[in-house]
Image (tube, grey):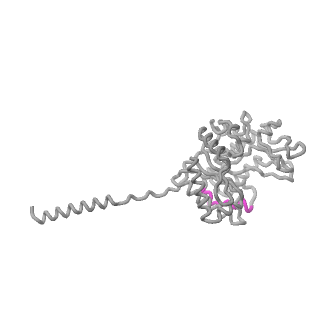
Amino acid sequence: MSRTVQKLISLLWVSLIVSGCKKNDVTPPTPPVVISPPPDLGFKVVGYFPYYRDPATVPDVKFRMTNVVNYAFGIVTPSGSLSINSIPVFTAIIAKAKANNAKIFLSLSGSHTDFKNMAATDAGRRSFIKEVMNAVRSYQLHGVDMDWEFPRTDDGTDATYTALMKELSDSCHRDAKYYITAAVTAGKYAGVIRDAIKNELFNYVDWFNVMSYDDFSTTTPYRHHSDYTLAQVSVNYWTTTRGMPKTKFVLGIPAYGRPSGITQTNTVLSYAAILAQSGSSQSDSAIVTAGGHPSPYMIYYNGQPTVKKKAMLAKTAGNGIMMWEKWHDTHDAASLLKAACDTIGRTY
């Protein structure tokens, strides 16, 4: 073999060795961050469970009727941090929801002032969101519900609310892992509260729990706070006028009653309490008594026929129903949640 050929072979080996070393030294590319919502749950049946209720008083079947349970509440504190009400109740509800195949969300609430101060700066929002996501991961939750009542257009909180929801959505939707929802007004009244909900939010939020109730008056008698007409107004405003995707519209239904033309203090009763005073599951009003009023008064609520109509409206024009709150309902054949599930064909 000639010296020239030997040199060529030597150079080839050196080239192969160097090439192999370079390949081994290459750092694999970082996978791109995916920001996308988790798989849609289909028709939602959402039930709130407040921290001040006893989980043992609500049977498992009421958790099977819902596919989402919102624990109320995680509170934004005056310092802008997160505080979860009654951890023992929270952990019990997490266990009960999961045992009955329901997703469990943490609903976030607090005073308008505390929300406003927290959301006013990038740093404040980042810190709060970090605490929220730590709680979601620590307690192995499925999502977050925002119940800020209410951002406004006249104090700048419409903009900071939008920023907060965008940033929280990005955190929840990283790798399509967690859901994000929001409670909003019925949409009946134009003004600084309703108009603070920007259409941009439709891109960030997986669905909206529309609070189609509490349209009461302390001065006008004979006014229902949550009749079927209000449900229709809510659907028409949010999905038609505003263009909210119907897949993101969840209709709120109350499991309690309110009087009209008198004080609301200590006169609001649960559906179960109304029926215990001889109210009918087939009616939307009853004569009751309560400590907040010296004489019998008329109370207005949703009976089973109205709830069935609302459930069908939600099925045809939206994508879910929400109830405030599980404990208010009865746990027998007169149950409003049962009536709704039976109407939409949800098995439990």
Task: Determine if residue 268 is in view.
Answer: yes
Residue extent of the magenta highlight: 191-204
Whether 217 is drawn above or below 298: the answer is below
Give the position of the C terminus as an image quadrant: top right
Instruction: Establish if 175 lies above or below 325.
Output: below
Q: Between 58 and 281, which is closer to the camera in this rendering?
A: 58
Which quarter of the picture shows residue 58?
Answer: top right
Q: Locate the N terminus by quadrant.
A: bottom left
Q: Position of residue 41 (x, y in %)?
A: 58, 45
Q: Residue furthest right?
A: 295
Whether residue 219 sits left or right of residue 73 in the image: it is right
* In-image side of 296 versus 180 (left or right): right
Residue 21, position as x, y percentages in the image = 29, 60
> Where does residue 157 sit, x and y in percent of width and height?
68, 63
Q: Is residue 234 magenta?
A: no
Does 203 appear in magenta? yes
The count of marks equals: 0
Residue 315 appears in the rendering: no
**Residue 146 lies in quadrant:** bottom right
